[in-house]
Amino acid sequence: MRYYKLLEHTADLGVTTWGGSVKDLFINSACAMYDIISDIQFVDPLISFHVKADGLDKDELLKNWLSELLYYFHVKNMLLGRFDIEHISDNNIVSLVAGENIDSKRHSLKREVKAVTYHNLKITKKGNRFQTNIIFDV
């Protein structure tokens, strides 16, 4: 089952993500971001490590955490495909993520996500699920 849908946006790329809990929403947002970059189903969880982030509220926390995850693509030349949240509060998150170094023989890159933006980023509860829109600078 898909955990996100693409949004039409003039210059950038957006997604709507959802989850039954805030934790699920964060995980699904990370999966959506990395699925935009490459097919995460082909990313093996060979290397795992903790990623932490802080924010003034849950919206900023999501943006900051996704930006930390994106760092591993840009600086460490990695694709991430597994995201487990060990702790989440209104202001901080501790996650255990896993992925592997990019292998041009096995991974095809679809789009480069340059940054996560604040544009229209607001976590809301709709019915029995949490939802947000995220705009990526591509």
Image (spheres, grey):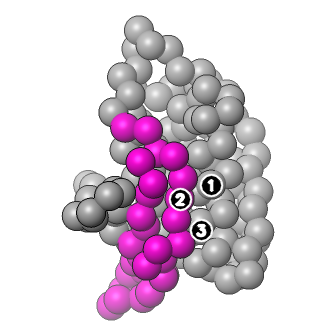
Q: For mark 2, does the 10 Å Cα neighbourhood hold few (<14), some (14 to 19), or many (20 or more) residues?
A: many
Cα distance between the residues tagged 1 and 3: 8 Å
Residue 3 in view? no
91 vs 31, left or right, is: right
Residue 112 place in picture, x, y as percent:
44, 38
Q: Residue under label 2, please give it.
A: 116
Assess whether mark 3 and mark 1 are in contact (beta carbons under 8 angstroms). no
Residue 30 place in picture, x, y as percent:
50, 54
Q: Residue under label 3, please give it.
A: 62
Which residue is at 33% across, 33% downward?
Answer: 110
- Highlighted range, magenta: 111-138
Which residue is at 74% across, 39% downward?
Answer: 49
At mark 2, the secondary structure is strand
Tag 3: amino acid: Leu
Assess whether mark 1 and mark 2 are in contact (beta carbons under 8 angstroms). yes
Is tag 2's residue or tag 1's residue first in the polypeptide sequence? Answer: 1
Q: Nearer the viewer, residue 20 or 121?
A: 121
Q: Residue under label 1, please give it.
A: 67
Which residue is at 44% across, 13% downward?
Answer: 104
Residue 52 place in picture, x, y as percent:
76, 57
Q: Nearer the viewer, residue 84 or 116?
A: 116
Quick one: quadrant of the N terminus? Answer: bottom left
Q: For mark 1, does the 10 Å Cα neighbourhood hold few (<14), some (14 to 19), or many (20 or more) residues?
A: some
Is tag 1's residue or tag 3's residue first in the polypeptide sequence? Answer: 3
Q: Is residue 67 above or below residue 42?
A: below
